[in-house]
Image (tube, rainbow, N blue to C red):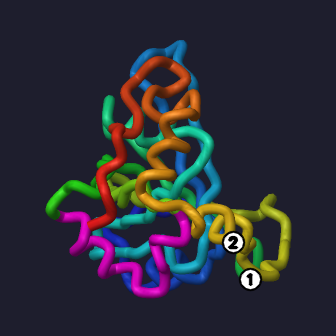
Amino acid sequence: MGKTYTRIDHRLRSFIDEQPVFFTATAPLDGDGTVNLSPKGLTGSLAVLDEHTVAYLDFAGSNAETIAHLRENGRITLMWCAFQGPPNILRVHGRGEPVFRDDPRFTDLLAHFPGIDPSRHGLRAVIVVSAELIRDTCGFAVPFMTYDEDRTLHGSRFARETDETLDAYFQKKEHIATSMDGLPGLPLPLPPTP
């Protein structure tokens, strides 16, 4: 049932663009470490940069496990599944890199997300993923669900933060600068927004 692709072609890109939610999975090299699986879904926060590269915006949150794992080993899998229409699951296995605010590439990468006001969400980094394996599988067991709208809570919560107060928020959180397994997470102090 599954098929392997050499690139993110127009059909796969359309499928990615149509999904209101996607998932990221990462893990440390230590076999006893914590596997991390995160849902993502703010409309406009993911972009297909080219046939082998996907990027998404990494916003303020309760931890920085994905960033820590990527800094340690770069392994990441992104997954989209159809909750409406024909059943399908698409995975992009690859290597990811967090591009932080003080990286010269940061501003150019932001241009790929014109529908997002990063100041409303505590933007920490742009995660850039280079695809190594692109596969789809059937989604026969994935239920039908409807998408109503994005939640506004994240934007309303973090819109009131300045760079200084956001840094203070991150400094107080237990698993931002260091992961649950003790790996380096988000570099602090937080660089200012470019």
At a point 54% along the width and 66% down the height, the residue shown is 121
Image-quadrant location for residue 141: bottom right
Which residue is nearer to you in this view: 15 or 189?
189
Q: Say if residue 135 shows up in the picture.
A: no
Q: Which residues are magenta?
A: 105-121
Q: Which amino acid does the dot numbered 2 rest on?
A: Ala
Looking at the rendered image, the quarter that the N terminus falls into is bottom right
Whole-percent x, y for residue 6 in the image: 31, 66
Reading the image, the residue beneath label 2 is: 82
Whole-percent x, y for residue 160 in the image: 59, 66
Label 2: element kind:
loop
Question: Which numbered dot is residue 27?
Answer: none
At a point 47% along the width and 41% down the height, the residue shown is 66
Which residue is nearer to you in this view: 84 or 99?
99
Which residue is nearer to you in this view: 127 or 35?
127
| Callout 2–callout 1 Cβ contact below 8 Å | yes
- In the image, residue 77 sits, relative to residue 43, either above or below, namely above
Q: Residues within 10 Å of mark 2 (few under 14, many from 20)?
A: many
- Is 114 magenta? The answer is yes
Label 1: element kind:
loop
Reading the image, the residue beneath label 1 is: 85
- Is 132 magenta? The answer is no
The answer to whether residue 108 is left or right of residue 180 is left
